[in-house]
Amino acid sequence: MTNDVVLVDAHDRQIGICDKRAAHLDEGKRHRAFSVHLIDNGGRHLLQCRAAGKMLWPGYWSNACCSHPAPGETILAAASRRLQEELGISASCRFIYSFEYHARFGSIGAEHELCHVLVARSDAVVTPSALEIRSIRWLTRDQISAQLSKSEAQFTPWFRMEWHCLLSEYPSFDMVMAG
């Protein structure tokens, strides 16, 4: 796949294409992204610890899969592709909501994304890509919320924002998955 991201306006309309690394330098350029929350049939959520080689937030915990669609690729197609590439699984994703955020990572760069949040359910055996993921954990909603409340917890900023919204707006993921 390409190393380009789709630059967008505040309404998610494409306004250009940019190299992925360049889109994350300095203050970052607003681009299209997605974030998948993977839930098993027992209601546990898969969290990943980002690989040390990641440019932004290496070693931080986040949701199962986050990435960017390639130019011309739909969000759902990109999510399916990245679930396979990062976790070695196939799972159907369902769109929940979109939001825009901007977060700096020290002097290295920033995320400025219009992020589409998705959920998927699977009990498949996960085989994480070492290039993307250092380690994984399956945790309940209560366990994740308890971890997030610790001041020293290292979670990506987008995960924190998404988790807060998911808990307040979607108290039962079963409702979301049913459709």
Image (cartoon, rainbow, N blue to C red):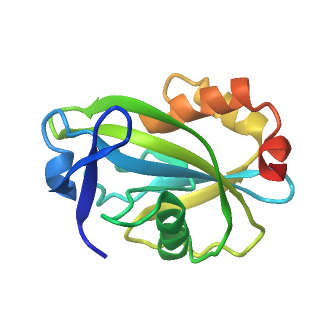
Q: Position of residue 144 (x, y in %)?
A: 68, 37
Number of marks in the image?
Answer: 0
| Residue drawn at 49 percent across, 53 percent down | 49
Residue 89 versus residue 50: which sits nearer the camera?
Answer: 89
Residue 125 versus residue 79: which sits nearer the camera?
Answer: 79
Q: Position of residue 171 (x, y in %)?
A: 79, 31
Residue 113 in sight here: yes
Q: Position of residue 47 (x, y in %)?
A: 60, 51
| Residue drawn at 40 percent across, 32 percent down | 100
- 33 vs 166, left or right, is left
- 118 vs 45, left or right, is left
Residue 155 in sight here: no
Residue 40 versus residue 36: which sits nearer the camera?
Answer: 36
In the displayed structure, 70 sits above or below 112; it is below
Q: Position of residue 136 (x, y in %)?
A: 58, 59
Q: Quadrant of the N terminus?
A: bottom left
| Residue drawn at 51 percent across, 49 percent down | 35
